[in-house]
Amino acid sequence: MTATGRMARKAEVSVETFLVWGAEGWIAGKLAELLKKGVRDVHTTKVRMEEREEVRQELDRVKPTHVLIAAGCTGRPNVDWCEDHREETVRSNVIGTLNVVDVCAMRNIHCTVFATGCIYQYDKEHPWHGPGFVETDPPNFFGSFYSMTKAHLEQVRAASPSITWFSLLQ
């Protein structure tokens, strides 16, 4: 193959560009690190997910082929913070996540949500050391406000099969 032929073939191959939401978080950092090791074009962002216009601008700036959401409100020092900061928790964990997913869907950008949260608890069907939960199991733990926001998001996910979500279940 000639040099011109190689260059033409290379131009045909689309470059995957990843935008990882949650730039300062542990999971987002690990995702970005893994993608960069795979020689991917990777960007991270601190743009607030609930700020729709800023989300649009960030997507226009980066032009990602894939968006990975590993952002959300977990509270400091822990999820108990969410009990007293419910509005901020809903804006980030529910409205923000759905906002990014929606804007990506409207632009035909692949979006994967990495959602952590305590949305399951052991029960008769899932005893300790018994069968685990699977993605299609409905959430059964609503014991904290943080968990409730994540469980409701899972219910929306279940009703939206065309959207790719990936849950890191606790």
Image (tube, rainbow, N blue to C red):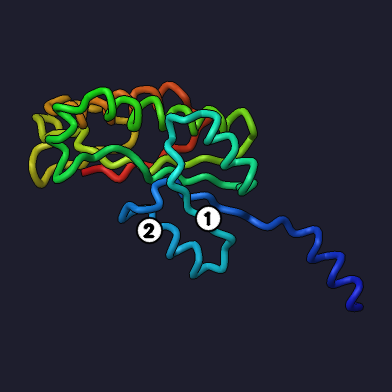
Q: Residues within 10 Å of mark 2 (few under 14, many from 20)?
A: some
Of the image marks 2 and 1, the number of the one nearer the N terminus: 2
Q: Give left or right: position of 122 versus 72.
A: left
Between residues 36 and 56, which one lies in front from this camera angle? Answer: 56
Residue 108, horizontal then vertical, whole percent: 64, 35
Circle 1 is placed at which residue position? 43
Q: Secondary structure at mark 1?
A: strand
Q: Indicate the quadrant containing the N terminus: top left, top right, bottom left or bottom right.
A: bottom right
Residue 169, horizontal then vertical, whole percent: 26, 43
Q: Secondary structure at mark 2?
A: helix
Q: Give left or right: position of 89 versus 124.
A: right
Q: Is residue 141 visible?
A: no
- Where residue 93 is drawn, which disc sits there? none
Q: Is residue 7 visible?
A: yes
Between residues 27 and 137, which one lies in front from this camera angle? Answer: 27
Q: Residues within 10 Å of mark 1 (few under 14, many from 20)?
A: some
Note whether 10 is above or below 134 in the view shown. Answer: below
Residue 45, horizontal then vertical, whole percent: 47, 49
Q: Residue at x 38, y 46 (%)?
A: 70
Between residues 151 and 137, which one lies in front from this camera angle? Answer: 151
Circle 2 is placed at which residue position? 29
To which quarter of the image does residue 53 belong? top right
Note whether 109 is above or below 27 in the view shown. Answer: above
Note whether 30 is above or below 64 in the view shown. Answer: below
